[in-house]
């Protein structure tokens, strides 16, 4: 056996295996270096998703000839001036990226140093191929640094094989730049590939929060900034700022969750867990909110030296951080009250767009083979609150004969001034239609009521338990043995939720009392669903969280089911309660409880604008 010290190129290639996974990771390191150099603008060029070329040019402090030569040596860095790993103010600090990349690719660095605003007389360049350094030579560069990486992984063919299609690699690269761009709105970024400009962000000066919102709008789009709540909170010296999307703006994966710690994009379990906790009440488990959150922690509170790619951090006190994130988000979400995202209305209007869903025929309207699905039927079964007194006797379209063409049941401007307006009717015994001062609102009565009952139950839970109502005749519900066991195991918690239930032989349970806030409920359905729910919950979760899940299942059963006809006063009462109840803009699964269409948008549908 011979033990030997590995040659440095091999050492660097091993390090590259950790740090440089794909073109996007090399690009991330170069852009981080450019940011650390004090650049005001960073221009990126990629070819073939970054396999053929990754070039990053900046206007930062640059390097002298000696510095260029040192920069590609292993563990050479200018960023740990006082050797203090706990006090890191830059994105880089490991002195590893350039030598690692240079060991697996062909790299050229050109740079012109600037010190105290004075540009050096000359620019210098150095090429390294598969770790072999060339000669330093004069170069032509006005300022800053330009680093080109060609043929990434040519020297490590095994890694090369793992690359995905150019498109996929390009997407990863763009994502990496977007993340960094979000945290530095004061820097301009461009990214080009194959003569196409993929990103062009202007530098935003001035107030950081305004600049950040503007940049987030550029990166994530108007949809995000319009439907995001500003977050600002502080706990024990740790500051949290940024924006959190309304629950109704959600996605099937967590890719649009951007988390930063001291300006560094991170993927952090603790933080994603805190996010899940904050939204648990508003979103189904498989839906994810959109957020961009920035934590600033004083040095010493956070350790960034955890992960070779610097994507993870460790907090000294994770409890404080979790509490800060959960608290701030919950607060913002309850302040948002019954607000649902505008995307809901956009989607609804999109569905109405005649051209998109239904082909036009001649100038007369829609093709007979595909009649306007919802609207005609809706009109035919239109049921106004007043006509519900005479029930089916009223002609369905009577209401449309008023002079201004709208269904006017009673003039009541005061009610219309409410955010959710005045109830005007019920369609399909499922949707409440109301009129606001500048639009119409369509409420899904079941979803809305479910949310209201759930919020009532939560409030009651927090205030010492949910009141119960006795059943005149106890109800026996037949279940299989395992389900009976699950229910009786949890009888105590269920009682706290207002459901008095006990085993009744081996194959049934008997229910004597039900939760007050549910009103009349379908006891059999409720108990069966609870038995299933308890099965899915697993044992490890916190009691409190489980109680809330169970409360949600209960709320679903006690709610005004779709299909129940409501009187006008009942509808108005529902609307007023929604306005007064936090989180009532979405049901317990993150679906909206109502859609608001502005008159201005409706007019557009009819080409009146
Ligand atoms: N774009 C740049 N502008 C100025 N200096 C740079 C640039 N890129 C790299 N450097 C210098 O090269 C050094 C090594 O870079 P790197 O290998 O990424 O390690 P680190 O960023 O951890 O210091 C940096 O510390 C910095 O001094
Ligand atoms: Mg670096």
Image (spheres, helix red, strand yellow):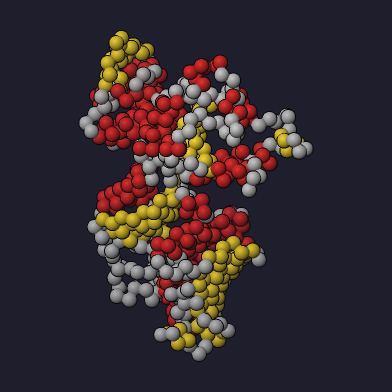
The answer to whether residue 283 is visible is no
The answer to whether residue 413 is visible is yes
Residue 100 vs residue 274: left or right? right
Residue occupying the point 45% across, 34% down? 412
Residue 133 vs residue 497: left or right? right
Q: In the image, is residue 254 above or below residue 50?
A: above
Residue occupying the point 30% across, 48% down? 327
The tally of labels here is 0
Q: Position of residue 260 (x, y in %)?
A: 39, 58
Would you identify the image quadrant in which residue 302 lies? bottom left
Residue closer to the observer: 404 or 545: 404
Q: Position of residue 321 (x, y in %)?
A: 29, 53
Residue 369 vs residue 255: left or right? right
Q: In the image, is residue 207 above or below residue 591?
A: below
Q: Residue furthest bottom?
A: 121
Quadrant that contains the N terminus? bottom left
Residue occupying the point 41% across, 85% down? 116
Would you identify the image quadrant in which residue 355 lies? top right
Residue closer to the observer: 478 or 83: 478
Residue 218 vs residue 502: left or right? right
């Amino acid at each position: 056996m011979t033990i030997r010290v590995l040659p440095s190129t091999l050492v660097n290639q091993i390090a590259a295996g950790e740090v440089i996974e794909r073109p996007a990771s090399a690009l991330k390191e170069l852009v981080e270096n450019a940011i650390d150099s004090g650049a005001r603008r960073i221009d990126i060029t990629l070819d073939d998703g970054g396999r053929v070329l990754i070039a990053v040019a900046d206007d930062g402090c640059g390097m002298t000839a000696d510095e260029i030569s040192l920069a590609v040596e292993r563990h050479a860095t200018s960023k740990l001036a006082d050797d203090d790993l706990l006090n890191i103010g830059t994105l880089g600090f490991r002195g590893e990226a350039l030598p690692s990349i240079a060991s697996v690719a062909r790299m050229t660095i050109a740079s012109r140093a600037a010190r105290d605003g004075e540009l050096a007389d000359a620019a210098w360049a150095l090429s390294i191929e598969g770790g072999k350094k060339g000669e330093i030579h004069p170069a032509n560069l006005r300022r800053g640094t330009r680093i080109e990486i060609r043929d990434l992984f040519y020297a490590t063919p095994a890694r090369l094989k793992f690359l995905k299609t150019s498109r996929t690699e390009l997407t990863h690269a763009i994502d990496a730049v977007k993340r960094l761009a979000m945290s530095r709105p004061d820097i301009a970024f461009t990214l080009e590939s194959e003569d196409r400009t993929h990103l062009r962000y202007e530098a935003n000066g001035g107030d950081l929060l305004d600049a950040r919102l503007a940049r987030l709008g550029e990166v994530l789009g108007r949809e995000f900034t319009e439907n995001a709540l500003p977050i600002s909170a502080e706990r024990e010296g740790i500051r949290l700022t940024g924006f959190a999307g309304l629950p109704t703006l959600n996605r099937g994966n967590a890719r649009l969750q951007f988390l930063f710690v001291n300006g560094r994009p991170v993927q952090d379990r603790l933080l994603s867990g805190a996010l899940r906790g904050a939204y648990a009440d508003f979103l189904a488990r498989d839906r994810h909110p959109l957020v961009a959150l920035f934590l600033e922690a004083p040095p010493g509170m956070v350790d960034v030296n955890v992960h070779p790619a610097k994507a993870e951090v460790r907090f000294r006190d994770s409890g404080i951080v979790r509490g800060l994130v959960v608290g701030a988000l919950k607060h913002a979400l309850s302040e948002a009250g019954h607000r649902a995202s505008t995307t809901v209305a956009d989607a609804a209007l999109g569905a109405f767009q005649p051209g998109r869903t239904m082909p036009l025929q001649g100038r007369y309207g829609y093709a007979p083979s595909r009649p306007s699905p919802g609207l005609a039927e809706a009109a035919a079964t239109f049921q106004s609150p007043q006509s519900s007194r005479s029930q089916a006797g009223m002609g369905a379209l009577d209401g449309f004969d008023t002079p201004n063409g709208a269904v006017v049941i009673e003039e009541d401007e005061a009610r219309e001034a409410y955010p959710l307006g005045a109830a005007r009717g019920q369609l399909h015994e499922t949707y409440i239609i109301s009129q606001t001062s500048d639009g119409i609102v369509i409420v899904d009565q079941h979803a809305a009521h479910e949310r209201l009952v759930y919020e009532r139950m939560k409030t009651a839970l927090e205030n010492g338990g949910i009141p119960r109502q006795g059943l005149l005749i106890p109800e026996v519900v037949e279940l299989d043995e395992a389900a009976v066991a699950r229910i009786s195991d949890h009888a105590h918690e269920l009682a706290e939720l207002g459901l008095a239930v006990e085993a009744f032989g081996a194959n049934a349970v008997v229910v004597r009392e039900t939760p007050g806030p549910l009103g009349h409920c379908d006891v059999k359905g409720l108990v069966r669903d609870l038995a299933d729910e308890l099965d899915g919950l697993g044992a490890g979760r916190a009691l409190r969280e489980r109680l809330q899940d169970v409360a949600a299942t209960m709320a679903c059963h006690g709610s005004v089911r779709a299909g129940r006809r409501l009187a006008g006063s009942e509808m108005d009462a529902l609307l007023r309660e929604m306005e007064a109840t936090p989180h009532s803009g979405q049901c317990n699964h993150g679906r909206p409880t109502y859609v608001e269409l502005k008159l201005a948008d409706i007019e557009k549908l009819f080409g009146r604008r």
